Image: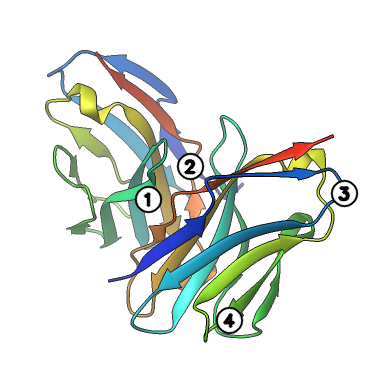
Amino acid sequence: EAQVTQNPRYLITVTGKKLTVTCSQNMNHEYMSWYRQDPGLGLRQIYYSMNVEVTDKGDVPEGYKVSRKEKRNFPLILESPSPNQTSLYFCASSIHRGRGYTFGSGTRLTVV
Amino acid sequence: AQSVTQLGSHVSVSEGALVLLRCNYSSSVPPYLFWYVQYPNQGLQLLLKYTSAATLVKGINGFEAEFKKSETSFHLTKPSAHMSDAAEYFCAVSGAGSYQLTFGKGTKLSVIP
């Protein structure tokens, strides 16, 4: 089944403890992206990647890092999480911008 | 820069009534436009997309949307609402030459029995 897989689905952590949210797609898509969803704000792009080793900032990149060492994987790294990063995170991939984007099921992160 | 405005953060309709969710966009180049639906505790599912072919686009679950360049609009409609349509709906735009997908803030649709 073609899909984008995120792990974990739920995560509660403490301020300052480094964490990684994994994202993997099995559709050979070149483009991948991370979004955060907050009530009343919709989805905002954090980072995106056009291909292996090619990444760029989205609208809200502060406090996040990404890497794209393999085409299928695009992990999101929070080096020192803070409570304002409590949010619902989505990974997405696409083969072409006109074809739409396939989203993962989301990761609900709580930083206390 | 591109942006999306969805009018109405909450819309309530009676079961069987017309659903109309409004979306206006700004883009300096002809855009790709999308509607996504999000059911509670789930990810986003693509409802339909406009990619410069027909201006009236049909999607899944009986939804359709019409691209009107002169009004920079891409409103989502469904002739008769079902209880199962209750969800949050997001309009999104991607400008030609860019993979950046910009979302509206979403419209939560409630269907009253």
The residue at which mark 4 appears reads as B68
Q: Are marks 3 and 2 on the same chain?
A: no
Query: Compared to A67, does A22 lie above or below?
Result: above
The residue at which mark 2 appears reads as A104
The residue at which mark 1 appears reads as A72
Q: Earlier in the sequence, mark 4 or mark 3?
A: 3
Graded by Cα atoms within 10 Å as few (under 14), some (14 to 19) or many (20 or more), the crowding at tag 2 reads: many
Q: Position of residue A92 (x, y in %)?
A: 42, 50
Describe the element under mark 1 as helix, strand or loop: loop
Camera-side residue of B8 and A82:
B8
Q: CA distance from mark 4 to mark 2?
A: 31 Å
Q: Position of residue B84 (x, y in %)?
A: 77, 39
Camera-side residue of A85 and B99:
A85
Q: In the image, which is nearer the foreground, mark 4 or mark 2?
A: 4
- Using residue A111 as the reference point, say whether residue B84 is left or right of it: right
Q: Are marks 4 and 2 in contact (CB under 8 Å)?
A: no
Describe the element under mark 2 as helix, strand or loop: loop
Q: Position of residue B71 (x, y in %)?
A: 52, 80
Q: Are marks 1 and 3 in contact (CB under 8 Å)?
A: no
Q: In the image, which is nearer the foreground, mark 4 or mark 1?
A: 4
Q: In the image, which is nearer the foreground, mark 1 or mark 2?
A: 2
